[in-house]
Amino acid sequence: MDDALPSFSFAVRGAVADAPGPEELRTWDDALVLVADDGEIIGRYDADDPIARQIVRERADDVRQLSPNELLLPGLVDLHIHAPQWPQMGRALQVPLEVWLQKHTFPLEARYEDLEFAKRSYRDLVETLLANGTTTGLYFGTIHNEATLLLAQLCLELGQRALVGRLAMDNPDECPDFYRDASTRAALEGTEAFIEDVRALPGNEKATVKPVVTPRFIPSCTDSCLEGLGELAEKTGAHVQTHVSESDWEHNYVLQRHGKSDTQSLSDFGLVNRHTVLAHGPMLSAGDMDHLVEQGAAVAHCPLSNIYFSNAVFPLRAALAKGLHVGLGTDISGGPSPSLLENARHAVHSSRMLEEGVDPSIEGDARGTPDSRVDFVTALHLATRGGGIALDLPIGSFEVGHRFDAIVVDIAAPGSNIARVLEGLSVADRVQQIVFNAARQNIAEVWVEGSQVSGFRHK
Ligand code: GUN
Ligand code: FE
């Protein structure tokens, strides 16, 4: 009689890769990943390991065998999504941020008072994100408690791990009458009630959906609102999200109003801690970054959105060199794609443009910022484990003890843009091709917390 096997629910066998660090790619040609009933990864073996062989022999029905075209990757973690902006994704990008907000975005977000509209839009968004491999989403909702709670419920129902924030926006100087919290008190009480309501949602006993304290950004909030939100973050232990030093206009607005940078200001209001995710940040100073590193806070790098609204490229490599936690965000709809892989490749592209510079009238050796480039390994890390670290959650790699949030990528899927000439390719080669060219049709299966939640096979 063989030794007793570890107790598990199912296993996945085949080619596997993950990127636990910004410059660390791990690949397995043939691995067996063991998942427990509760969705935890409890083992990872080379397929020729004696235990793996015994599992394949004795529990064949519980082993999901990947095809030679398939690869198991960690699920994608999108650190910055404006859920209500989904209907305008791919439109209105011709104006600067401050005009875009007032003219296009606030009127759209105000419509989420209508719960029927909210339900239709949010369901379509969450289904689309899942189909693109996004297993965890960090969402901005609107100022409406009901519609934002509905978003949290939909994430629960559709099986996406999510962190959801009800926006606080109470500053009459920067927010229109038709889309503003009625008072500072309304913003604070609304936020506190939302935190309690998400935590009490039926079916959320494992807290796969979490509430987030969400001042939209400093311009939208009064000082007393920011102060109250800092106190709420401390009292409830909830995550915090907002925008930081996103554009010249926004960065200078805060310098003028508070006489200090966004980072210093948010920190003084108690809004920068280990569970804070700050979106964008191209104008962060070296000192700001040092402070974020000290606090363990993270940046959601949104390379596609930054092209339109940020006036500059986020110095990703310099941030990583400081040890700053960085993940990726689509910033729907500032970024015109729901695909985090699209943003992963743009993280590489924009880092190359930063390194080379963009103005041909400047001599080559003075044109760019040296040592700025990152490669596909860093991009994959940001899209997966970087996001997990930012959120302080055990997701984003195939480490034993992590949750099984994963995607099966079929690089030869029908309609795919990846060359179907696969002979002689290593797993690392295939990962590289996926980062640069995989799209929705390549995402064959999507798993969250050990359950399949999207994809066209095995459901
Ligand atoms: N700053 C404040 N609100 C927003 C928003 O909705 N999108 C982006 N990109 N920046 C913002
Ligand atoms: Fe944003």
Image (cartoon, grey):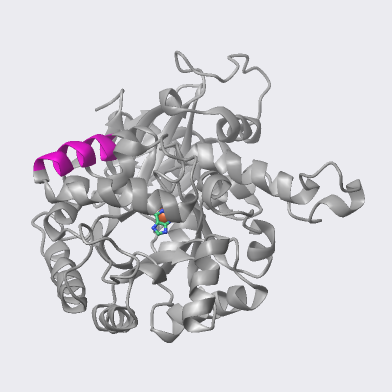
The residue drawn where x is 54% and y is 68% is 251
Q: Classify 439 as above or below 178.
A: above
In the foreground, 10 or 354 = 354
- The residue drawn where x is 32% and y is 34% is 128
58 relative position to 325: left or right: left
Is residue 130 visible from the viewing direction of this image? Answer: no
Q: Position of residue 368 (x, y in %)?
A: 80, 52
Left or right of 272 on screen, residue 143: left
* Occupied quadrant, residue 52: top left
104 vs 355, nearest the viewer: 104
In this rendering, would 354 be left or right of 76?
Answer: right
Q: Is residue 388 visible?
A: yes
The N terminus, quarter of image? top left
Q: Is residue 119 magenta?
A: yes
Q: Is residue 310 depicted above or below 273 in this figure?
A: above
Q: Nearer the viewer, residue 189 or 430?
A: 189
Quadrant (top left/top right/bottom left/bottom right) for the C terminus: top left
Q: Quadrant of ligand 2?
A: bottom left
Q: Quadrant of residue 170?
A: bottom left
Left or right position of 229 against 383 = left
Place of residue 113 in the rendered image (x, y in percent of width and height, measured from the top left): 13, 51
Q: Is residue 424 above or below residue 352?
A: above
Q: Nearer the viewer, residue 296 or 193?
A: 193
Number of numbered discs overlaid on the protein picture:
0
Query: Which residues fall within the magenta stretch?
Result: 116-127
- Residue 189 part of the magenta segment: no
The prevailing secondary structure element of the residues shown in magenta is helix
Query: Where residue 295 appears, x then y in whole percent?
Result: 50, 79
The residue under the point 15% across, 40% down is: 117
Q: Position of residue 134 (x, y in %)?
A: 38, 42
